[in-house]
Image (cartoon, rainbow, N blue to C red):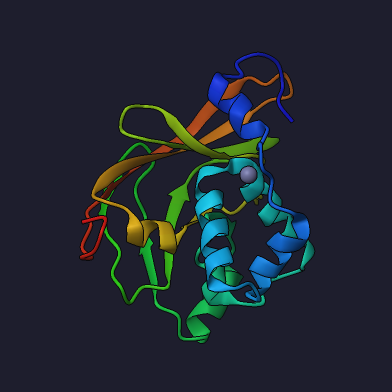
Amino acid sequence: MHGGGGISGDDALQANCANPIDAAVLADYWLGVLADAEEDAIEEHLFGCDRCGDRLREVVALAGGLCDLARAGSLRMVVSETFLQRAAEEGLQIRQYSPPAGGGVQCTVTAEDDILIGRLTANLKGAKRVDLSVVDERGTEQARLRDIPVNPSAGGVILQESITFAKAAPTNKLLMRLVAVDEAGGERLVGEYTFDHTRSLSGPGA
Ligand SMILES: [Zn+2]
């Protein structure tokens, strides 16, 4: 998966989950057939574990689609226009932001929102592998979606942020970076987008 050098301690940690969630459990989670407590535990694990997030995305891809669009909103993932269209048709409330490349946007999420979308405009022509890197205010990478699905002619990526995560988040700033990775593991920044999130929900994260 990784190319040459530059594997940080964090990366090594994330690449080797000490307690990976069983694929069958991930599938059950996706199907929404787990008990609430188990579901909560899995969501909590997924927020902190890129590896299991990757594996869940694989389970979703293998499942051939989305059985539960509302559940789909809880996962940070790249989505398609078709997905958004279907979500809108199902009556889900979609909140979308389109920060300019190299710039930022003020954003929030309300209790009524079901799906949270960032449209990341970028020229992805010629990129063989694209990663999405999520970086906090201190410049620390928090998460990385490796080898995201990219359509070179699409002019960017439609990123869904986990609505569960966003609803729980305090006011904070997150940088989303699209990074082209070459075969040798070299990285090239393709686009950087700042999401300046203001919490507008009451509750524990306020
Ligand atoms: Zn894990």
Residue ID at (52%, 75%): 70
List x then y, in percent, for residue 116.
Answer: 41, 63
Q: Is residue 120 visible?
A: yes
Residue 19 falls in image quadrant: top right
Nearer to us in this view, 118 or 42? 42
| Quadrant where the image shows the C terminus | bottom left
Task: In the rendered view, tell whether residue 147 sits above or below residue 112.
Answer: above
Residue ID at (65%, 42%): 51
Residue 13 falls in image quadrant: top right
Task: In the rendered view, tell whether residue 44 sits above or below residue 37.
Answer: above
List x then y, in percent, for residue 8.
Answer: 56, 19
| Quadrant where the image shows the N terminus | top right
List x then y, in percent, for residue 20.
Answer: 69, 45
Residue ID at (57%, 55%): 78
Please tell me in which quarter of the rendered image ligand 1 is found. Answer: top right
Nearer to us in this view, 54 or 27? 27
Task: In the rendered view, tell whether residue 205 sits above or below residue 19.
Answer: below
List x then y, in percent, for residue 30.
Answer: 65, 68
Q: Is residue 61 visible?
A: no
